[in-house]
Image (cartoon, rainbow, N blue to C red):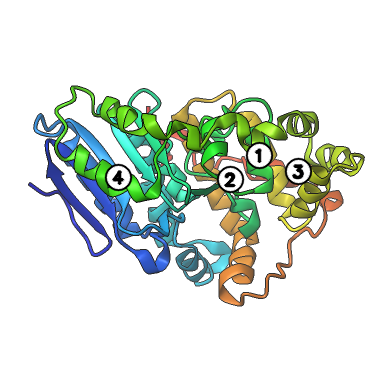
């Protein structure tokens, strides 16, 4: 039995488990609208199917689970029309966020094998479903919400899951866009178990034969012998936790930078240098988003982010960020404004101004 299969998404059912394999290796499994629709169709088909007891989503390549949305497509679609407006962009983000919501509230165990690059939209299809999820990382895992590096913000529910990371770690990850590995992911509560990359084929084989009542228990038992290879207490985030909490608990990005500037540690100097490369405006927008997200449920976070992403394309910061990173590849974005000092409260608040009346909001059905 199969569900919707496209060029880049393969679906199958074995041992009453629905398998979704992302298969766009040349683009690091960056999500296209067709891929979003194929994943959604499979999940909807299996949602009430008694012959499917769990879901496993994974990659056919060890390089990446999913590097995010297709940002080259974002640039192409966003530059075709004035103020970044595009029906294709509207469809992509509306349907992607609806998929994130579906995953979060999915009624069956949902297991994500986060091998290789896991960024942006990849986090969106891996972090949902608090009650039913199982997130596996490997030594190859490179995890991040790096959107501030392209003039965007941590979307796909990032306002929800980053704001619930312990202490100020979520603010640090969102505002800096830094990449973390397996031990960090487990420490931050963004992953559950570690399995060596070389053992993933064996894990998939096990999942195809296990008779465990809860498939997640089979994954935990398989991962147990490898727990010592990614110890949360040894993660860089754990080691720098005191410093992160000290600086990123401040009430603004300017205050964070000032605090870091007054710290002569190597970590503070490195972090400050990273932030100086990011979009000043989007760091401030991200900071405000995470403060709001801490008080909102998943659906409200996704609604908020849907409004924010439209504002990003209207402003054009994301188009400049993508131009610099993947189009011209000059790594010299012309951020607007160019400095934190020039970012005003009004600029930041403008990203949260409703784009639609609630009765007309494209995600109004999310509960």
Residue at the spot of label 4: 57
Which is nearer the N-term, disc 4 or disc 2?
A: 4
How far is disc 4 from disc 1 in space, using C-alphas? Answer: 28 Å
How far is disc 1 from disc 3 in space, using C-alphas? Answer: 36 Å
Element at badge 4?
A: strand
Residue 79 position, x and y percent, is 54, 70
Disc 2 crowd, CA 10 A, few/some/many (<14, 14-19, 20+) = some
Which is nearer the N-term, disc 2 or disc 1?
A: 2
- Asked whether the beta carbons under mark 2 and mark 1 sit within 8 Å of each other, the answer is yes
Comparing 121 with 169, the one in front is 169
Comparing 62 with 252, the one in front is 62
Residue 129 position, x and y percent, is 37, 30
Which residue is pictured at 54% across the width and 37% down the height? 183
Which residue is pictured at 35% across the width and 40% down the height? 112
Marks 3 and 2: which is nearer the front? Answer: 2
Residue at the spot of label 1: 236
How far is disc 4 from disc 2 in space, using C-alphas? Answer: 21 Å
Marks 4 and 1: which is nearer the front? Answer: 1
Element at badge 1?
A: helix
How far is disc 3 from disc 4 in space, using C-alphas? Answer: 41 Å
Disc 4 crowd, CA 10 A, few/some/many (<14, 14-19, 20+) = many
Residue at the spot of label 3: 346
Quarter holding residue 54 = top left
Residue at the spot of label 2: 180
Which is nearer the N-term, disc 1 or disc 3?
A: 1
Question: In the rendered image, is residue 44 in sight?
Answer: no
Marks 2 and 1: which is nearer the front? Answer: 1
Which residue is pictured at 83% across the width and 43% down the height? 257
Quarter holding residue 89 = bottom left
Question: In the rendered image, is residue 336 in sight?
Answer: yes
Seen in the picture, residue 310 relative to 334 is either above or below; the reply is: above
């Amino acid at each position: 039995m199969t569900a919707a299969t496209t060029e880049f998404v393969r679906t199958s059912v074995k041992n009453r488990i629905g398998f979704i394999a992302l298969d766009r290796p040349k683009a690091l499994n960056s999500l296209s609208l067709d891929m979003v629709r194929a994943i959604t169709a499979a999940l909807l088909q299996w949602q009430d199917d008694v012959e499917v007891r769990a879901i496993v989503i994974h990659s056919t390549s060890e390089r990446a689970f999913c590097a995010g949305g297709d940002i080259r497509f974002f640039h192409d679609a966003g530059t075709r029309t004035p103020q970044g407006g595009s029906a294709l962009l509207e469809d992509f983000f509306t349907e992607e966020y609806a998929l994130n919501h579906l995953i979060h509230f999915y009624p069956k165990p949902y297991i994500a094998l986060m091998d290789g690059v896991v960024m942006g939209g990849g986090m969106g299809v891996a972090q949902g479903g608090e009650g039913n999820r199982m997130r596996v990382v490997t030594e190859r895992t490179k995890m991040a919400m790096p959107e501030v590096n392209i003039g965007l913000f941590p979307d796909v529910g990032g306002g929800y899951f980053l704001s619930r990371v312990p202490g100020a770690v979520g603010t640090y990850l969102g505002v800096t866009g830094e990449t973390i590995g397996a031990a960090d992911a487990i420490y931050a509560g963004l992953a559950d178990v570690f399995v060596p990359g070389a053992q993933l084929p064996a894990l998939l084989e096990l999942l195809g034969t296990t008779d465990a009542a809860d498939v997640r228990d089979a994954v935990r038992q398989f991962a147990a012998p490898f727990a010592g290879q990614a110890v949360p207490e040894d993660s860089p985030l754990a080691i720098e936790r005191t410093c992160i909490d000290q600086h990123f608990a401040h009430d603004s990005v300017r205050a964070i930078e000032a605090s870091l500037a007054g710290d002569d540690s190597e970590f503070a100097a490195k972090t400050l240098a990273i932030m100086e490369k990011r979009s000043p405006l989007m760091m401030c927008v991200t900071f405000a988003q995470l403060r709001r997200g801490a008080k909102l449920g998943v659906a409200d976070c996704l609604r908020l982010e849907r409004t924010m992403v439209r504002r990003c394309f209207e402003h054009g910061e994301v188009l400049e960020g993508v131009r610099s990173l993947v189009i011209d590849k000059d790594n010299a974005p012309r951020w607007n404004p160019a400095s934190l000092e020039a970012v005003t409260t009004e600029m930041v608040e403008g990203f949260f101004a409703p784009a639609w009346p609630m009765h007309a909001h494209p995600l109004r059905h999310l509960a």
